[in-house]
């Protein structure tokens, strides 16, 4: 759960969503092409020149004298008094101020958790990309005979539970943060006939569930946790945030490669930023999902049970710090800590007597 975002218990099912996200990212980069090109041209204009050939044909590996950015060979007295040095400081200040203002202006606040995150993609762009990827996915699996028809029992069940939870996203103003993007979402739920134990969401409310989940989950309430987790990714705009992060990292690594001639940032960025960020998104989707299922009158006590079942028999030998997802133990422990608040929502707004018996309904 959001890569497209999914809930797979280990890394085994991640390749498909990484491929889908890569395609979405490619389209986002293409859509943002003019802006990125302008940034690249600006970068090339202000880059320090460290290699040049003089009129005598000699190649020098240092900054050319007379450029607006004095090189190391310049004397400290001439450097400090040079008008070019003042210009450099002035321009650097403007660039820093402009970058800071741009960053702050594009910060959003996730509902309920109140986490601030940097998002460049508008909800409209996100929905267009998601719709295109969703159509391609459906066509591919329908032609292969793996897409269950809408009147199939499992497809009807997923649609019934999913839409009941999705309806609760229309009234999230009490949670604070940005919620306008949840208006007028055209939610769609489909089931792929596969033994894979997985589910994921594409931008714009397009949810895919694999039938292998029904061999693991034992009730509608446990299914509700999985679907609420995916819907939580949409509430938090994790797909748009992830695309923004990938765009930013790509630009940073490209600039670093141009400056140093090598890519030394890939490993540190992956371990220090991308993987921890991915785990944060999964935990956040769990948190939002637990609250959403409670609001939709599904017993939140089934939330930790569902996450525990998903990991049963799928334990990964990979350490958590190398994984895109938190360990099952971490997820279950966090959900259990959040249960009292979710139970208060559930017991305060739902007919618990009737739900007591329906919570035991089996697939």
Image (spheres, rainbow, N blue to C red):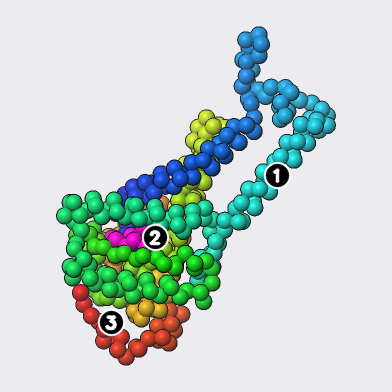
Relative to 15, does residue 293 appear above or below in the rendering?
Answer: below
Residue 94 disc label: 1
Q: Disc 2 vs disc 3: which is toward the camera?
A: 2
The residue at the far top in this view is 56
Q: Main secondary structure of the magenta part?
A: strand
- Does the segment drawn in magenta span residue 19? no
State the CA–CA distance, disc 2 to disc 3.
Answer: 30 Å
Residue 359 disc label: 3
Tell me: 81 left or right of 185. Answer: right
For label 2, the residue is 204
What segment carries the magenta color? 198-209
Q: Position of residue 363 (x, y in %)?
A: 20, 74
Residue found at x 76% / y 31% = 84
Q: Position of residue 68 (x, y in %)?
A: 72, 29
- Does the segment drawn in magenta span residue 203? yes
State the CA–CA distance, disc 3 to disc 1.
Answer: 59 Å
Relative to 256, does residue 208 appear above or below in the rendering?
Answer: below
Does dot 2 land on a helix, a strand or a loop? loop
The residue at the far bottom in this view is 353
Residue sitting nearer the eye, 180 or 353: 180
Residue 28 seen? yes
Residue found at x 79% / y 26% = 75
Relative to 193, does residue 72 appear above or below in the rendering?
Answer: above
């Amino acid at each position: 759960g959001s890569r497209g975002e999914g809930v797979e218990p280990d890394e085994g099912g991640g390749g498909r969503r990484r491929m889908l996200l890569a395609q979405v990212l490619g389209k986002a980069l293409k859509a943002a092409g003019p802006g990125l090109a302008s940034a690249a041209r600006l970068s090339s204009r202000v880059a320090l020149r460290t290699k040049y050939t003089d009129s005598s044909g000699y190649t020098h590996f240092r900054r050319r004298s007379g450029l607006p950015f004095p090189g190391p060979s310049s004397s400290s007295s001439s450097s400090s008094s040079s008008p070019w040095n003042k210009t450099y400081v002035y321009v650097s200040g403007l660039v820093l101020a402009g970058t800071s203002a741009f960053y702050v202006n594009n910060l959003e606040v996730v509902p309920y958790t109140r986490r601030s995150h940097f998002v460049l993609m508008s909800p409209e762009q996100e929905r267009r990309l998601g719709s295109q990827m969703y159509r391609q996915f459906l066509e591919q699996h329908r032609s292969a005979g793996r897409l269950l028809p809408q009147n199939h029992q499992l497809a009807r069940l997923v649609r019934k539970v999913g839409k009941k939870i999705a309806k609760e996203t229309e009234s999230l103003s009490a949670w604070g943060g940005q919620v306008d993007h949840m208006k007028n979402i055209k939610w769609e739920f489909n089931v792929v006939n596969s033994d894979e134990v997985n589910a994921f969401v594409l931008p714009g409310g397009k949810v895919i569930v694999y039938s292998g989940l029904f061999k693991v989950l034992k009730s509608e309430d446990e299914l509700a946790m999985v679907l609420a987790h995916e819907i939580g990714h949409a509430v938090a705009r994790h797909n748009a945030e992830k695309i923004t992060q990938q765009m930013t990292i790509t630009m940073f690594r490209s600039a670093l490669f141009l400056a140093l001639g090598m890519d030394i940032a890939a490993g540190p960025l992956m371990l220090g930023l991308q993987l921890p960020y991915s785990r944060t998104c999964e935990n956040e989707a769990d948190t939002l999902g637990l609250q959403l299922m409670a609001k939709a009158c599904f017993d939140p006590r089934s939330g930790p049970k569902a996450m525990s079942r998903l990991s049963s028999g799928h334990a990964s030998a990979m350490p958590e710090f190398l994984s895109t997802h938190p360990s099952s133990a971490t997820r279950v422990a966090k959900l259990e800590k959040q249960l009292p608040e979710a139970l208060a929502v559930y017991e305060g707004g739902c007919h618990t007597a009737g739900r007591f018996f329906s919570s035991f309904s089996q697939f």
